[in-house]
Image (cartoon, rainbow, N blue to C red):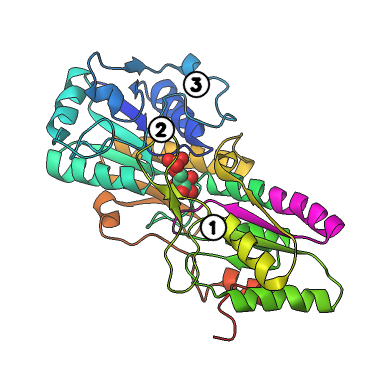
Amino acid sequence: MAKLSVAIMTGGGDAPGLNAVIRAVVKHGVTELGWRVVGIEDSLDGLLETPRRVRELRREDVRGILRLGGTILGTTNRGDPFAWKPDGNGGGDRSGEVAASLKDVECDGLIAIGGDGTMAICARLHKEAGIPIVGVPKTIDNDIPGTDITFGFDTAAAFATEAVDRLHATAEAHDRVMVVEVMGRDAGHIALQAAMAGGADVCLIPEVPFRWEPVVAKIRRRKAYRRHFSVIVVAEGAAPVGEGPIMTTAPGSNRPHHGGIGQRVAEEIAERAKVEARATVLGHLQRGGNPSAFDRVLATKLGSHAVELVEEGRWGRMVAAVEGRITSIPLDAILDAPPRTVELLGSGVRAARGMAIVFGDEGA
Ligand code: F6P
């Protein structure tokens, strides 16, 4: 039987561990199973542009990348082939060209590593354009439905925890309230993890619309027992009751993204609690850097399982980590599923409340 020829791409924002997946697919697929693996540059751009930007990935191309952040293939979070316009504004349907282009580069199918947006596109490419695809979920936000954990999260949360630790020192030295804004989009997983691991006093997450009074009361209570400083972790998507998240548009971009709640919290708290408050935004520092050991191993397991699925001809699936096991779910199961947000009655929030961490909904 002819050996398989498989394309691989990374889509959406980068997350630590992407290179570990690429390496796993090449090592397992090429070295162990004799496949040909073709890397597509910058998500589907490399397949749809003329000239195409694709290159064969051999064993030597993935040497030394296990520990590296970013992605050797490049990525983009613009460009849905069903509504294609390179600037991401929506346009024509180029899904048929994806299938034709894959054939042209003599690939039997595609392993796509990406977030919820990429997985949704992959589900449609499989269902509507008949493209054989296996998806590998990634995101620092840890919010993809169907998998208990995504690689990138552990590294991002560890970085955020270190930031909380460092800010604690200054908060205590100067009797200040230090506010740290973390990423996570509409999910508070990074914030909750960093607040718990860093021993923060307040944790504001998108899942819990907050009021200012409980936050101010917490700072005053701490002052009353001579703790003149506080540390607040706020997820970028968190918002006061009745308000939406703060969005902003970066220079040179036409796509709004979350950002600004940290500064708003610092200003409100300074005014309401009569304290000095400073905000730090961790931003993309959480996404870069070398993946943690946990993320390297998770990414390797998921990449290797994707190879197993392809070898067995089980296309149209997304690899997943469920209850400690590496498995897979149908790709289209994630199409209508809501993001996997923080469980309000889960062990994390319950334990955090047990540690007197305030979420801003107390006494409501
Ligand atoms: O989904 C990952 C993530 O880092 C989010 O936490 C954040 O809201 C978003 O991407 C930022 O995206 P961009 O880098 O495109 O602004």
- Image quadrant where residue 109 sits: top left
Say what amino acid the circle numbered 2 marks: Gly
Q: Secondary structure at mark 2?
A: loop
Residue 90: name its quadrant: top left
Helix, strand or loop at label 3? It is: helix
Residue 314 among magenta residues = no
Q: Amino acid at mark 3?
A: Val
Q: Residue at x 53, y 51 (%)?
A: 183
The residue segment tinted magenta is: 162-186
Q: Is residue 346 above or below residue 170?
A: below
**Of marks 1 and 2, which one's residue comes earlier in the chain?**
2
Residue 62: give its label: 3
Name the residue: 48% across, 27% down: 23
Inspect the image, locate mark 1, and give the three-letter code of the amino acid beneath it: Ile
Res. 4 visible in picture: no
Q: Which mark is residue 261?
A: 1
Q: Are there few (<14), some (14-19), or many (20+) residues within 10 Å of tag 2?
A: few
* Residue 42, percent from left and from top: 36, 27
Front-most of 199 and 65?
199
Question: Residue under circle 2?
Answer: 252
Q: Which mark is residue 140?
A: none
Q: Is residue 166 left or right of residue 364?
A: right
Image position, residue 69 (x, y; %): 55, 32
